[in-house]
Image: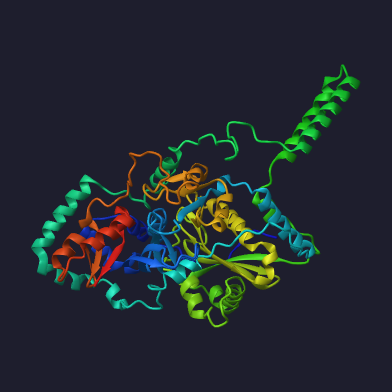
């Protein structure tokens, strides 16, 4: 079975546009940028807080609390920064649980693929797939199933904002031409001149980090945050003691003893001829070290199948938004797999898994397709990872490829193949895929698995993909999951960062610098506030800015009618 196919060959994205989108700029500059390349900017409508709606994890009728916004378009860098602050998307709806209020706190979890080693249960799933492909063996091993993470609960619960079309017309989302905007701006010329001076002074005083142009500094700061938190020795019964050498298998110890005895016998019989003994010792040591080396995921996935293999598995990556030719050609087949999955696994009635629901939830995405020279060959954006068995789709993993990670969105599969543990298998394939992308895009080195919900036992399986980190809900730094679990045993809501003096370094500091799109003109919130008629919306804008952070609030466009 060969490596994963990269079906798409996307047209390279102009480097200058990539840089412009990524860096925060002064008010007048961002306004011009918005007019010239609107479709390359993030435009959102903030919906605010929704509380007291059903939870799909604990069956609470009114326990869920979250914040949401509708994304008309979004750059991959903006979405990367948002998920690093606890946000997540469902279709074009981007939401964030209010962690200290919701019934089941949902902590963002990421795995470190570059250091990942499959567990014994993971290897069983990989071996089972190989056995099925080679010999057609479909026997099920008891106890190797893991529950599937279904973000469908969030999608259904957030249906109050999920809609097929936004109420805002597309013309309102496009900034005016340069000439029209300049004519409108002359009416407020004096105020704008003052604003330009104010913004220029503020920019010199505190320049926000340029997260995309200066990727190295952004990535290193993120890693340093995690590095500050020192690993502690686990208590008895709480995990492996990292200060001690790893346990060894009894059969390996027996082999070593037998080899040692054999070498002793050889030494006695060949005494006086060290030149003949040493090669034997070296050969034995080399073979022993190679045999003891743990197998990687790739050793299982990319192993060559026999010529007479019963089945052939192929994994194709196709862009889902905007839909590629390959995606369009396989849309109906993919939808039928989704429909069968929803009916068998989630017990949906036959008329519920509609094409509209499928499209809105798993195909629509606000992420712009981007393909910078330093990125992966497939580019960044939203994709479907299709698993083809003997020429038909049996599973589809919905993923987002972002500057620093592969983010898993959802998985659906043909229920006839449940025995293959496709939830576990696809997660391992996505970890391997992240490693593959990392070879071209060095900063892409994490695998985001969505939310870890410790208060829901069936959702704890994500913690078995190690090493992994959880996102602190207050300071937004990554903490090794081993340090988080003891605290979560005592309280479902926790601040993982043990430094009590630490604060959210990306918090909003200047509300006036929030970018607003109003009447097709991009302007700072301080200018919009002066022009606005009617009651003040400052409280809503303040809440929005505090949750997306200063950097995103200055880069994204908040639509105001």
Of all residues, the one furthest to the left in this rendering is: 190
Q: Is residue 230 visible?
A: yes
The foreground one among 163 and 185 is: 163
Q: Is residue 511 left or right of residue 434?
A: left
Q: How many marks?
A: 0
The foreground one among 441 and 348 is: 348
The quadrant the C terminus occupies is bottom left
The foreground one among 327 and 297 is: 297
The foreground one among 219 and 21 is: 219
Residue 203 vertical position relative to residue 229 in the rendered view, above or below: below
Q: Is residue 270 left or right of residue 333?
A: right
Give the x, y percent position of residue 405.
48, 54
The quadrant the N terminus occupies is bottom right
Give the x, y percent position of residue 47.
32, 68
Residue 438 vertical position relative to residue 244 in the rendered view, above or below: below
Q: Is residue 374 visible?
A: no
The residue depicted at 39 percent of the width and 50 percent of the height is: 473
Residue 416 vertical position relative to residue 280 in the rendered view, above or below: below
Of all residues, the one furthest to the top in this rendering is: 272
Q: Is residue 526 left or right of residue 78?
A: left
Q: Quadrant of residue 236?
A: top right
Q: Which scheme is used to colour this image of the protein?
A: rainbow
Of all residues, the one furthest to the right in this rendering is: 269
The residue depicted at 54 percent of the width and 77 percent of the height is: 328
Give the x, y percent position of residue 278.
80, 25
């Amino acid at each position: 079975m060969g490596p994963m196919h990269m079906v798409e060959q996307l047209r390279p994205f102009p480097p200058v546009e990539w840089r412009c989108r990524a860096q925060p700029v002064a008010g007048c500059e961002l306004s011009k940028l918005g007019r010239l390349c609107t479709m390359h900017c993030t435009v959102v409508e903030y919906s605010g807080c929704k509380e007291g709606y059903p939870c799909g994890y604990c069956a609470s009728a009114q326990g869920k609390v979250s914040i949401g916004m509708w994304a008309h378009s979004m750059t991959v860098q903006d979405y990367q920064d948002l998920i690093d602050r606890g946000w997540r998307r469902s279709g074009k709806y981007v939401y964030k649980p209010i962690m200290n209020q919701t019934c089941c706190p949902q902590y963002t979890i990421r795995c470190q693929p570059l250091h990942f080693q499959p567990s014994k249960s993971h290897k069983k799933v990989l071996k089972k797939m190989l056995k099925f492909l080679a010999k057609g063996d479909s026997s099920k091993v008891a106890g190797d199933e893991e529950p599937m993470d279904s973000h469908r609960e969030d999608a259904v619960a957030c249906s109050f904002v999920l809609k097929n079309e936004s109420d805002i017309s597309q013309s309102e989302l496009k900034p005016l031409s340069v000439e029209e905007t300049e004519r409108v701006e002359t009416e407020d010329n004096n105020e704008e001149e003052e604003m330009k001076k104010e913004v220029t002074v503020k920019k010199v005083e505190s320049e926000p980090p340029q997260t995309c142009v200066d990727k190295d500094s952004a990535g290193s700061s993120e890693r340093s945050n995690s590095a500050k938190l020192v690993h502690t020795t686990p208590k008895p019964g709480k995990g492996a003691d990292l200060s001690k050498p790893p346990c060894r298998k009894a059969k390996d110890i027996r082999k070593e003893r037998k080899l040692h005895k054999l070498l002793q016998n050889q030494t006695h019989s060949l005494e006086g001829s060290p030149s003949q003994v040493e090669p034997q010792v070296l050969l034995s040591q080399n073979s022993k070290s190679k045999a003891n080396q743990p197998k990687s995921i790739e050793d299982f996935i990319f192993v060559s199948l026999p010529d007479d293999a019963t089945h052939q598995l192929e994994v194709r990556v196709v862009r889902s938004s905007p839909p590629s030719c390959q995606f369009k050609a396989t849309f109906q087949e993919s939808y039928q797999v989704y429909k069968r999955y929803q009916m068998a696994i989630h017990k949906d009635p036959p008329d519920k898994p509609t094409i509209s629901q499928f499209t809105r939830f798993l195909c629509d995405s606000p992420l712009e397709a981007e393909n910078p020279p330093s990125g992966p060959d497939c580019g960044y954006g939203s994709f479907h990872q299709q698993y083809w068995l003997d020429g038909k789709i049996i599973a589809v993993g919905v993923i987002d490829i972002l500057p620093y990670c592969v983010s898993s969105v959802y998985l659906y599969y043909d229920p006839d193949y449940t025995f293959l543990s496709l939830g576990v298998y696809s997660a391992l394939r996505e970890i391997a895929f992240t490693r593959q992308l990392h070879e071209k895009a060095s900063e892409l080195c994490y695998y985001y698995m969505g939310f870890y919900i410790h208060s829901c036992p069936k959702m704890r399986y994500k913690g078995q993909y190690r090493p992994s980190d959880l996102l602190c809900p207050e300071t937004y730094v990554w903490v090794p999951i081993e340090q988080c679990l003891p605290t979560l045993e005592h309280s479902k809501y926790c601040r993982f960062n043990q430094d009590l003096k630490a604060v959210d370094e990306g918090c909003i500091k200047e509300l006036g610098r929030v970018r607003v799109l109003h009447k097709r003109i991009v302007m700072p919130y301080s200018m919009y506030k002066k022009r606005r008629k009617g009651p003040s919306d400052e409280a809503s804008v303040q809440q929005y800015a505090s949750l997306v952070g200063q950097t995103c609030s200055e880069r994204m466009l908040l639509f105001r009618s």
